[in-house]
Image (cartoon, rainbow, N blue to C red):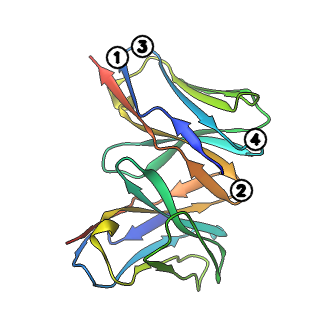
Amino acid sequence: GEDVEQSLFLSVREGDSSVINCTYTDSSSTYLYWYKQEPGAGLQLLTYIFSNMDMKQDQRLTVLLNKKDKHLSLRIADTQTGDSAIYFCAERWSDKIIFGKGTRLHILP
Amino acid sequence: DAGITQSPRYKITETGRQVTLMCHQTWSHSYMFWYRQDLGHGLRLIYYSAAADITDKGEVPDGYVVSRSKTENFPLTLESATRSQTSVYFCASTDQDTQYFGPGTRLTVL
């Protein structure tokens, strides 16, 4: 069945770039998403990419999509302490959205 | 204000009691969803609804009941709460492109 995989933890030094990776299984997914969850809060949509796109850039965020490998990545440039959160990759499959388990981004001083 | 709201935000109950979590959205989105979030499991879909009076089971529906008599409301009921249902519950609604989440309800079952 459909599945979304992502690593559970990532540590990055403040000011460096963070790259969070995700793989998904359904090649017919129409949209792929990145959500951010800060402690004690709900999920906030960061960005999304339509499946016919390869890349999308929005200020410090760059999303890359490799459809052949079913691989999605989120790059955060100049990582700040406020970027510390859990990042969820998700794919839209039929009328549902399937989430990965989330990657906890830890910022090192 | 427009958006998606959940109530209560925090709830403590006892094993065996019935609990209803409320979800309300002002966008008139057709689709609505209930998830639970637990450490090590990420988000798991409990139930979803494509429209008023249409509901479907998700990944973990056992022990939960939903209804959708009006487009804007999607309550989730735990008919007889168990400790394993201690979790954070998120409601969401979807437009054509994107899923929007409520702030969550933290439920503790003692």
Is label 1 in contact with label 4 (beta carbons under 8 Å)?
Answer: no
Q: CA distance from mark 1 to mark 4?
A: 35 Å
Q: Are marks 1 and 3 on the same chain?
A: yes
Picture residue at 32% right of the left edge, 78% below the top: B81
User: Which sits in the foreground, B105 or A104?
Assistant: A104
Q: CA distance from mark 1 to mark 3?
A: 6 Å
Q: Specify the amino acid type for callout 3.
A: Asp
Q: CA distance from mark 1 to mark 2?
A: 36 Å
Which numbered dot is residue A27?
A: 4
Report which residue position mark 2 lands on. Answer: B96
Position of residue A10 measured from the top left corner of the image (x, y, whole percent): 40, 25
Is label 1 in contact with label 3 (beta carbons under 8 Å)?
Answer: yes
Residue B1 seen by the camera? no
Q: Quadrant of the C terminus of chain B?
A: bottom left
The secondary structure type at the circle numbered 1 is: loop
**Residue A30, above or below B22:** above
Is label 3 in contact with label 2 (beta carbons under 8 Å)?
Answer: no
Q: Specify the amino acid type for callout 4.
A: Ser
Q: Quarter-wise, where is residue A51 in the image?
A: top right
Ranked by sequence position, the earlier of labels 1 and 4 is 1
Q: In the displayed structure, does residue B108 sit left or right of residue B26?
A: left
Picture residue at 67% right of the left edge, 70% below the top: B30
Report which residue position mark 3 lands on. Answer: A16
Ranked by sequence position, the earlier of labels 3 and 4 is 3
